[in-house]
Image: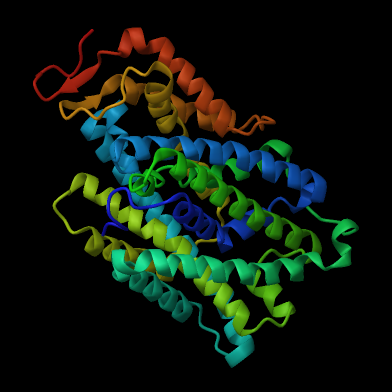
Amino acid sequence: MNIEGQGSLSVFNFFLLWFGAAISIAEIMTGGLLAPLGLSTGLLVILLGHAIGVGILALGGIIGANTKAPAIMSTRISFGIYGSYLFSIFNMLQLIGWTAVMIISGGRSVNIIGKMLWSLDNVTLWSIVIGMLIILWIMLGQTGFKKLNAAAVILLFLLTIVLSYVVFKKGELFTAQVEGEISFGTALELNVIMPLSWLPLIADYTRFAKNTKGAVLGSFLGYFLGSSWMYLIGMVSGIVFANPEPGAIMIAANLGFTALGIIILSTVTTTFLDVYSAGVTFLNIFPKLNEKNVAIVMGIIGTIIAVIVPIEQYENFLYAIGSVFAPLFAILFTDYFITRKKREISEELLINWGSMLVWLIGIGLYYMLIRFDFILGTTVPVMVLTSIIYVALLGWVGNWKYMKKSQQSYQA
């Protein structure tokens, strides 16, 4: 299911795509965790964390625009074909997980509104409805995506202005006392990890860019502005209402059907990207399958998980994503942007054991450093340290490769 033909997406298309992706319940709920910081410190953390996180995200977009390869396939540059298969599995797991999280979160928020409008209390029903709408969005394919996405984002933009008005008009914003606590480093990490969760996806879309500059600029601005805005709404909701749940806020504001539209549309437009990229990732292992059909299956699986598995919090899930993908892309970025020794996908490289070893070291570093609550969070230090370790060990592990034409798993 190509979104459009090769080289067809402009800077405006990318802005709409990523702005729409950022307008989601997950972003608002995560922003609500920052409420204990207060308005001024919280705003600083949101802007700084997003500048870092979306900057890292943009690097993945550059590789996709240049190589015209999907995100997970581009990891073959550093890890080889078999390495990319392993990361495909991890990426499918996190994408299906995100799909389930978004569907159940949307279902719960819509259920709050459904109880008010029709006395209908059934989270499972609303989750299934949202899952079916996502699958319908996928079925529209390349002919309907661009126009529908543009219309959806414009509508979401207008509706979230209303939501922003509801949140910011409260006079208690500057005087409210917020319970709980969160450190600057932990808060920064929550802002960095959210854009990082899109890192295994962004090249799936920038590979269709008219040019690299437009892809990166549109993606950066769209996600930075949209996600920062959603985090701010969530944080202020947590300060003023002591509850960042979008459904509850909109019920308090008597938005009714408008609230229903905001939640359903934002959930569908964001979760579509997760489901579509899960299908693209699956094709890295089984390239002969139909992209659209695989994406539909992924949407069905995500919906089933949302219905039968209780998902109560985002934090641990976000940290798990960071631990796997931060060191992975640190190694890829080092090869592509710093050493520049590997910038093309080799069809002969089956697996690079040296890169895999450093990746495992990076995962260990993530869980070790997360205990220390650094002011810069965990992701940035781990990516920097992983890159340094990788460069330092290149002379030793640089030839630990298993090639198609070689029977040796590595060379000393």
Residue 223 lies left or right of residue 405; in this view the side is right
x and y, in percent, of residue 299 in the image: 34, 65
Q: Is residue 370 above or below residue 389?
A: below
Q: Residue at x 53, y 23 (%)?
A: 384
Asked if residue 303 can be seen in this view, the reply is: yes
Q: Quadrant of residue 121?
A: bottom right
x and y, in percent, of residue 8 in the image: 34, 52
Residue 147 lies left or right of residue 400; in this view the side is right
Residue 260 lies left or right of residue 375; in this view the side is left
- How many badges with numbers are in the image? 0
* The C terminus sits in image quarter: top left
Display colour scheme: rainbow
x and y, in percent, of residue 84 in the image: 27, 37
Q: Residue at x 73, y 38 (%)?
A: 184
Asked if residue 103 can be seen in this view, the reply is: no
Q: Residue at x 39, y 16 (%)?
A: 339
Q: Quadrant of residue 263?
A: bottom right
In this view, the residue farthest toward the bottom is 118
* Foreground of the two, 110 or 268: 268
Q: Residue at x 45, y 39 (%)?
A: 213
x and y, in percent, of residue 321 in the image: 47, 43
